[in-house]
Amino acid sequence: MRFSALGDVALTVPVLKAFLDFNPDKELVMLSNQQLSGLFEGIERLNFIGADLKKEHKGIIGVFRIFNMVRTQIEFSTVVDLHSVVRTYILRCLFTVLKKWTAGVKKSRFENFALTRKENKIFRPLPHATERYIKVFESLGFGVAHLSSGPDQIISKPIKVSPKLKIGFAPFAKHNTKMYNLDKFKEIVRHFDKKPYQLYFFGGTVAEKLLIGGWEKEFKQVNPQHHVKGFKQELELMQEMQVMVTMDSANMHLASLVNVPVVSIWGPTHPYSGFYGLHQNPLHAVQVNISCRPCSVFGNKSCWRGDHACMDQITPGMVIEKVEGLLMDQQP
């Protein structure tokens, strides 16, 4: 079980694949938000059950409806809770009544607090989210192939002989504090709005698509994406990119799923929190070192200083340098 957010659900995908590879006699059923079904298409021995959390399965009554839906649709022995929120805790209790084995992910609240508090931070990398997911399976007695994070696992995509280099830009994030200034972001795009680059914009909400529509008209080297519908097609298009430029956002994790190198921009959050793109090169993170960083694990808190310095001190040139350096490293 994992219902949100998009990036966190995306991080379950490599873990579920690793579980299935290690356990060829097992099957999995993924219970998540029905809008995220596209993330799990094409995975053998994995079925998907979607919940409508805004309507039919909203609130406490919706939790009982999810419970009834699951227990009547499938046969299962074990429940792995990769979310550990009120909704999944209640579901785990209900499944326990049915004599199912259950376990939930531990959220490392103290370690998160120590990393993000104003003073006396304990500044060290926390376990990656995928490692914490794997531990839940292990606590139930299952083996899972660990997802190595060594240098040999870092995503690299050698440039093929092609007249164009495709760069994907995803300037959005769930929380505004994690977004880079859009005017500055446009300076980055403008730098690459020339041959041999082909530019693509990625966004999901109505407001994001409206802004992208304006940018597609403003820049010359942009390839519009009017034909792209749903996660499956979006991932297929993203897979063609030579590099993605993102925030600390779901698009960073989506690009990681399709093995595309990412230059990511970080403000109030930090890769040390355990949510860096899986197998992404840490050197491709764009960030400034100021004493108040990080102030949040998820970017859902207002700026203590009031000036958003962690983002404002990042210049377009810093991002451009990372992108050009990554492309140069990929040259044959």
Image (cartoon, rainbow, N blue to C red):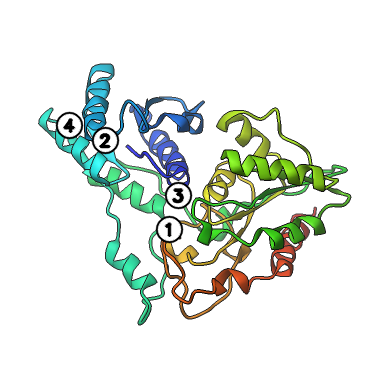
Relative to 18, say whether 286 is above or below. below
Coordinates of residue 229 in the picture (x, y in percent): 62, 28
Q: Is residue 39 visible?
A: yes
Label 4 with label 2: CB-CB less than 8 Å: no
Q: Residue furthest top?
A: 72
Coordinates of residue 291 in the picture (x, y in percent): 48, 81
Bin the neighbour count of mark 4 within 10 Å (Cα to Cα): few under 14, some 14-19, many 20 and up.
Answer: some
Q: Is residue 76 visible?
A: no
Q: Amino acid at mark 1?
A: Phe
- The residue pinned by badge 1 equals 298
Please identify, in this view, whether the residue under mark 1 or under mark 4 is nearer the observer: 1
- The residue pinned by badge 2 equals 59
The residue at the point 59 percent across, 45 percent down is 255
Coordinates of residue 110 in the picture (x, y in percent): 27, 67
Residue 98's label in the rendered image is none
- The residue pinned by badge 4 equals 95
Q: Secondary structure at mark 2?
A: helix
Considering depth in this image, is 89 or 171 the residue closer to the camera?
171
- The residue pinned by badge 3 equals 147
Please identify, in this view, whether the residue under mark 2 or under mark 1 is nearer the observer: 2
Spatial CA distance of label 1 from label 4 is 30 Å
Label 3 with label 2: CB-CB less than 8 Å: no
First in residue order: circle 4 vs circle 2:
2
The residue at the point 40 percent across, 44 percent down is 145
Spatial CA distance of label 4 from label 2 is 18 Å
Relative to 68, say whether 216 is above or below. below
Q: Secondary structure at mark 1?
A: loop
First in residue order: circle 3 vs circle 2:
2
Please identify, in this view, whether the residue under mark 4 or under mark 2 is nearer the observer: 2
Please identify, in this view, whether the residue under mark 3 or under mark 4 is nearer the observer: 4
Q: Amino acid at mark 4?
A: Phe
Spatial CA distance of label 2 from label 1 is 23 Å
